[in-house]
Amino acid sequence: MKRVARVQRGADPHWVGDGFPVRTYFSYDQGPSISPFLLLDYAAPARFEPAPAPRGVGPHPHRGFETVTIVYDGEVEHRDSAGGGGRIGPGDVQWMTAASGIVHEEMHGRDFTRRGGTLEMVQLWVNLPARDKMSPPRYQDLLDARIPRVPLAGDAGTVRVIAGEFLGAAGPARTFTPIELLDVQVHAGRSAQLAVPAGHTAIVLVRRGAVQIGGRDVRATELAFLDRDGEVLQLTAAATDAQLLVLAGEPIPESVVGYGPFVMNTKAEIGQAIADFESGKMGRLP
Ligand code: MN
């Protein structure tokens, strides 16, 4: 049975561009304990009034990893220099592989901007192993309808399988290394058991409600890092329904050298990434 190694709250909120008020829960300067993950930002529900032009973050590059955006409420529109793009809404996920490098923008959707509304989303950065860091970029639009919903035993709730597998249902995300990304709802007072391969990094973000894991309480907007031992993650929801995101993955045993939007294995590769971006080799937005 997995135990909680530590619980932490997000850092103070900051704005990504003018569209995303996020708290950062971890980033790559925390070292190998979070591998294969590099960064987690959570934008808790925030109200936006109607506006004449979309808010968001303008063109910026990435190299060496993947950005995974999960929208719970509102609408996010993306465009990148490799021709990828799309608009995702509640329940949808965008899995963007920057790999050798892209330039993209991340904005609120046009309809959402016109109407105003509540935005809630997560952005997760997933590292790539050295052999894949310079692969061509790709873009996966994982719409809610394609994400399997699996009932938990005993009517305890539901698991949406974004990546990896749960009770034989496979998530639609194609990943470079073994990753499980599960969006979990547990009804008030009920317990759920999830299997996570031993040795994988396993992290739980509680969005709503509270859960108990191995005797530790983890409350809304808290993040629990779990021990890598054990394969069974047992959680019990407190007196209200709990909504949480479970991320797990096989650690990548390689050095991590990051600088802003670039995450590589060496300082020289970071220097190369900056030079390639500045000379236009990561492309431009149309
Ligand atoms: Mn970005």
Image (cartoon, helix red, strand yellow):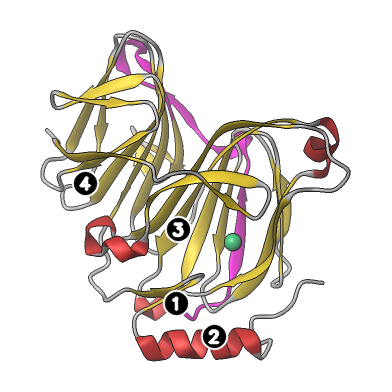
Q: Which is more foreground, mark 4 or mark 1?
A: 1
Q: Nearer the viewer, residue 174 or 29?
A: 29
Instruction: Identify the amino acid type marked 1.
Output: Lys
| SS assignment at label 3 | strand
Counting residues from the N terminus, which is met first, the one under dot 4 or under dot 1?
1
**270 to 258, vertically: above or below:** below
Instruction: Identify the amino acid type marked 4.
Output: Pro
**Residue 145: x percent and y percent?**
62, 34
**Residue 128: x percent and y percent?**
40, 69
**Residue 83: x percent and y percent?**
73, 68
Q: Which is more foreground, mark 1 or mark 2?
A: 2
Q: Are marks 4 and 1 in contact (CB under 8 Å)?
A: no
Query: Of the numbered discs in the image, which one, if any, rests on residue 274?
Result: 2
Instruction: Identify the amino acid type marked 2.
Output: Ile
Q: Residues within 10 Å of mark 2 (few under 14, many from 20)?
A: some
The residue under label 4 is 197
* Inter-mark Cα distance, 2 to 4: 37 Å
Q: Are marks 4 and 3 in contact (CB under 8 Å)?
A: no
Instruction: Identify the amino acid type marked 3.
Output: Trp
The residue under label 1 is 133
Q: Quadrant of ligand 1?
A: bottom right
Counting residues from the N terminus, which is met first, the one under dot 4 or under dot 3?
3
* Inter-mark Cα distance, 1 to 2: 15 Å
